């Protein structure tokens, strides 16, 4: 309600300005001024590193354009969303209503994304999702002004089930944080694992971002499944990997996951991560010039190794660059801007990809194995995998 009223009063004052002849200079100034980019990401908490990697990657794509979008300078506005869903709408409104950003880039956590999605739908602000995989954003609550450059939560795990059954693991336990990302990752796992002939003997969970895994690991030990599959990410993933090994499970019950489990955490997890198999739309070791050059440039600039989050941030930048260049920086030309982004081919370190009709990447899923502190690609688990996009109406 508040949001809508604010929007109405803003357009009413613009109309007032028009009748007094002020509209054109105002528009001209907006056109010539800087493009306002809002970054709404987690900079504290278990996903803090993910937020930093996304911002780094995003800035790198813009830096390749001399820091400009469609010929215009860029001004950044930042909010730490703390991965706190309760503040999702409020934080998005800080960027959209107070800072009047032209584009909102965010975020990591699916629950927080739902707040951004509401603000994006209410105000029409261009919203680019660099991580959060919540289905609704590109299914039932999709919008013409919302584009995702990452994945849907069930995409990586839809490539996982068959891999596990092919390895002879017929009975699995699933474990995750109980919130949209974990629940939707489970949907993909359940679908692919049961279709391949596997049986899920137990679904285990704990609230986000809880990392007290001990009781659940004891339960896994007594259930004795052939394998365990999971969704965890960030600091919590590093702890889960270490606790799994410390509980004596590593050599007895193979651990699988959507690839977030082993992204950006390999130094923190140490040898406990060796041998973990995951499915994901990126791998450090992809043997392409594009990936190698990206990794070298990123490491040089940030003194850090890039991970999937850095790639997603970078691709978000590439997408925005293509859109802004197509309209020569005129971000108000939404029809042409969105058409350019819908038609874009993103030449990503993960491999080239395009948007589905619902604005989510259609992409290959790699099978990766942790070896010597790196996610090594050992195969393609699914080719050109698209989310169903079910329930999305964009017209
Ligand atoms: C999510 O909440 O959507 C999420 C968070 C971290 C990930 C993946 C998905 O690594």
Image (cartoon, rainbow, N blue to C red):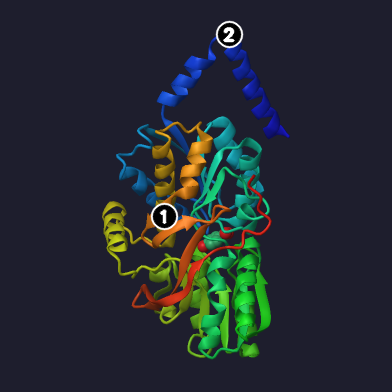
Quadrant of picture, ligand 1: bottom right
| Residue 386 on image: x %, y % | 54, 63
Q: In which quarter of the image is the C terminus?
A: top right
| Residue 299 on image: x %, y % | 29, 58
Q: Which image quadrant is residue 67 in?
A: top left
Q: Is mark 1 within 8 Å of ligand 1?
A: no
- Asked whether residue 234 appears in the rendered view, the answer is yes
Q: Image height check: is 8 above or below 158?
A: above
Residue 320 shows which numbered tag?
none
- Asked whether residue 88 appears in the rendered view, the answer is no
**In front: mark 2 or mark 1?**
2
Q: Which image quadrant is residue 65 in?
A: top left
Q: Image height check: is 275 above or below 101?
A: below
The residue beneath circle 1 is: 53
Q: Report how far apart the C-alphas of labels 2 and 1 lie in the structure.
A: 47 Å
Q: Quadrant of the N terminus?
A: top right
Q: Nearer the viewer, residue 215 or 287?
A: 287
Q: What residue is drawn where x is 65% and y is 88%?
A: 223
Q: In this view, does 32 lie to the left or right of 208?
A: left
The residue beneath circle 2 is: 20
Q: What residue is drawn where x is 53% and y is 37%?
A: 335
| Residue 288 on image: x %, y % | 30, 66
Q: Which of 233 and 134 is in front in this view?
A: 134
Q: What residue is drawn where x is 52% and y is 90%?
A: 252
Could you say whether the residue bearing mark 1 is in a helix, strand or loop?
Answer: helix
Could you say whether the residue bearing mark 2 is in a helix, strand or loop?
Answer: loop
| Residue 97 on image: x %, y % | 59, 32
Q: What residue is drawn where x is 52% and y is 87%?
A: 166
Q: Which residue lies furthest to the right in this view?
A: 1
- Crowd rating for badge 1 (residues with CA inside 10 Å; few <14, some 14–19, many 20+): many
């Amino acid at each position: 309600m508040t949001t809508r009223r604010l929007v109405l009063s803003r357009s009413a004052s613009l109309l007032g300005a028009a009748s007094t002849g002020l509209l054109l200079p105002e528009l001209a100034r907006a056109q010539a001024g800087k493009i306002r980019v809002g970054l709404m990401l987690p900079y504290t908490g278990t996903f803090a590193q993910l937020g930093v990697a996304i911002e780094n990657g995003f800035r790198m794509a813009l830096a390749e354009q001399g820091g400009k979008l469609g010929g215009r300078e860029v001004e950044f506005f930042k909010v730490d969303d703390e991965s706190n869903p309760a503040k999702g709408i409020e934080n998005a409104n800080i960027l959209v209503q107070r800072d009047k950003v032209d584009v909102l880039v965010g975020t990591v956590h699916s629950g927080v994304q739902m707040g951004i999605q509401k603000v994006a739908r209410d105000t029409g602000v261009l919203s680019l999702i660099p991580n959060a995989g919540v289905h609704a954003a590109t299914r039932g609550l999709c919008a013409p002004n919302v584009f995702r450059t990452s994945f849907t939560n069930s995409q990586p795990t839809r490539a996982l089930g068959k891999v596990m059954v092919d390895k002879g693991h017929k009975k699995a336990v699933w474990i995750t944080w109980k919130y949209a990302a974990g629940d939707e990752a489970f949907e993909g796992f359940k679908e692919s694992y049961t279709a391949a002939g596997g049986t899920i003997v137990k679904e285990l969970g704990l609230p986000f971002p809880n990392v007290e895994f001990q009781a659940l690991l004891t339960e896994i030990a007594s259930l004795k499944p052939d394998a365990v599959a999971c969704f965890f990410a960030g600091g919590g993933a590093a702890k889960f990997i270490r606790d799994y090994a410390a509980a004596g499970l590593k050599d007895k019950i193979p651990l699988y996951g959507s690839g977030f489990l082993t992204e950006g955490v390999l130094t923190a997890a140490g040898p406990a991560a060796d041998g973990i198999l995951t499915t994901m739309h990126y791998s450090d070791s992809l043997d392409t010039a594009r990936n190698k050059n990206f990794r070298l440039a990123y490491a040089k600039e940030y003194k850090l190794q890039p991970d999937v989050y850095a790639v997603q941030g970078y691709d978000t930048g590439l997408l925005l660059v293509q859109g802004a260049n197509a309209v020569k920086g005129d971000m108000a030309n939404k029809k042409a801007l969105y058409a350019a982004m819908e038609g874009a081919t993103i030449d990503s370190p993960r491999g080239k990809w395009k948007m589905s009709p619902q604005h989510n990447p259609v992409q290959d899923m790699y099978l990766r194995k942790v070896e010597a502190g790196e996610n090594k690609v050992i195969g393609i688990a699914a080719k050109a995998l698209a989310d169903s996009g079910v329930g999305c109406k964009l017209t």
